[in-house]
Image: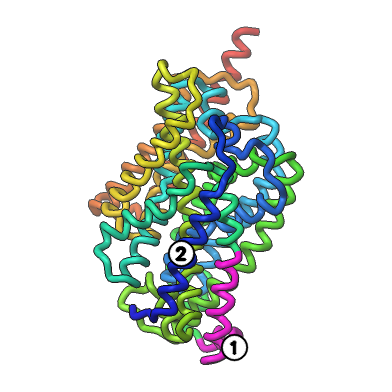
Amino acid sequence: MNVSNYDIIIIIIYFVFLFTIGFFRRSKNHISQTDYIVYGRKLSLPGFVITLVSTWYGAILGVGENTYLYGIQTWFIFAFPYYIFAIVYALWLSKIIWKKNILSIPDIFRKRYGNEIGIISAFFIFFLSSPAPYILSLGVLFNFIFNIKLIWCLLIASIFSTIYVWKGGLSSIIKTDYLQLILMFSGFFLLIGFSWHNSVSPLGLFKSLPSTHQNPLGGNSLQYVLVWFFIAIWTIIDPNFFQRCTAVKNPGIAKKGLLISICFWFLFDAMTVTAGLYAYIHTVPENPLMAYPLLGLEVLPPGFLGYFLVSLFAIIMSTIDSMSFVNAITIGRDIIWRLRKKDSKKNPVFLIKKGLIAVAILSIVLSILIPSVVKMLYTLGSLIIPGLIIPFIHALIGNNMRITKVNAILWLCAPVAISLLFFIMSALDIGKLLNIEPFYPGMATSILIYFYLKINSESKKLINH
């Protein structure tokens, strides 16, 4: 991809400005884990909306790829289901989570089911909330623009997206997200405006598309699209949602902020899908993952192209820093800190900072093993969500159902094992006649275990009475 000197200068200015914002912080000799992890629970409504909206779109290149290949299906798998579960979160869970005053999701599991289950849940969440898909996205984008070897691009993506988080934690993330949000919306506004100017209106664009691109299924099976709908349940157990709802001043801010965020997401999703459809008529990429950058190269003049590339950097980096941070909290605080008794009374912030390094290394390895953004999201979601979602909801809203340690471990691990089994069978073409996505048998297992535990608990109550 040939970019002009003007574009290079704009990209350099962006990185300098971003690090200046991220690193600027009043020095403190000691920062508590509450300040570091949840901003001292003083997050305002604007800050809540801005940081939540900007954190959502790390797989932006995958959105462009999917729209180029399958049209408006993208909105039905990457947007609409998430609105539904975000509304559920706002109306049902946000107040409960704020009142719990607990710093992480594994702490919810630990408090309800015991220390061992808390650590097991942390391992699952660690893989599910991995920033690897987004580090891969940024690495591939660096590779495409600057023609540097991918391994170095992945390393650059990891360092540049998390270095400022080291010092300020959530505070640094929120400050940089103000800039990222402005860039993401203005960048795609420019891309659509120039695309419209160079071709047809969005309405004329839609009418000119083939039937597959106008179809919500995009030529895929209903089962495939429904799996993405169920993967959106991930919203309920997303550490970023949990962290932001815990960090606000009061529960009303979380509820209102989530509903406002959905409006922003709807607007931006409309922009990204429209841009992907313009890419379909303007470009013929060898790799559809580069649909957005190639559309920018086609329709944007020098300077404007640099600004748009910066907006792509901002979108991906705003997700990497947040995901890396919650991942570092998971491995540093929720796993290592809980396992190392000698550190149990120390402030875990130093372990979270070390966790940032571990997260970067593991994410690079995972990016190399599964070099596809959409495939990585789909695989991790299909395998792990079935083991977490129902036990988490039960732990959060709670009841008097008695669950032993062994049963709790079974409830978390069996669904993941079943999903993994079906995934392996599918990969080896064993049992292909079943044609079942791995998510479904895993989720069915979790539901069956829930009813078994409920019946077992009620039986014991009757016997005791």
307 shown above or below 281? above
Q: Amino acid at mark 2?
A: Phe
Q: Quadrant of the C terminus?
A: top right
Q: Would you say residue 297 sits in the magenta stretch? A: no
Q: Are marks 2 and 1 in contact (CB under 8 Å)?
A: no
| Crowd band around label 1 with a 10 angstrom C-alpha radius: few (<14), some (14–19), many (20+) | some
Which of the labelled discs sits on residue 146, or is there none? Answer: none
415 shown above or below 364? above
Residue 302 visible here = yes
Position of residue 186 measured from the top left corner of the image (x, y, whole percent): 59, 72
Q: Secondary structure at mark 1?
A: loop
Position of residue 140 measured from the top left corner of the image (x, y, whole percent): 34, 64
Position of residue 273 measured from the top left corner of the image (x, y, whole percent): 53, 73
Residue 222 visible here = no
| Crowd band around label 2 with a 10 angstrom C-alpha radius: few (<14), some (14–19), many (20+) | many
In the picture of the structure, the residue carrying the numbered disc 2 is 313
Q: Amino acid at mark 1?
A: Ser
Q: Secondary structure at mark 2?
A: helix
Q: Quadrant of residue 144?
A: bottom left
Identified at 69% across, 40% down, the residue is 42
Q: Earlier in the sequence, mark 2 or mark 1?
A: 1
Nearest to the observer: residue 119 or residue 188: 188
Q: Quadrant of residue 103?
A: top right
- Region of the chain picked out in magenta, as a range: 182-208
Q: Would you say residue 191 sits in the magenta stretch? A: yes
How is the protein colored in the picture?
rainbow
Identified at 41% across, 56% down, the residue is 134
Position of residue 365 measured from the top left corner of the image (x, y, whole percent): 28, 48
Nearest to the observer: residue 160 or residue 131: 160
Nearest to the observer: residue 326 or residue 207: 326
In the picture of the structure, the residue carrying the numbered disc 1 is 201
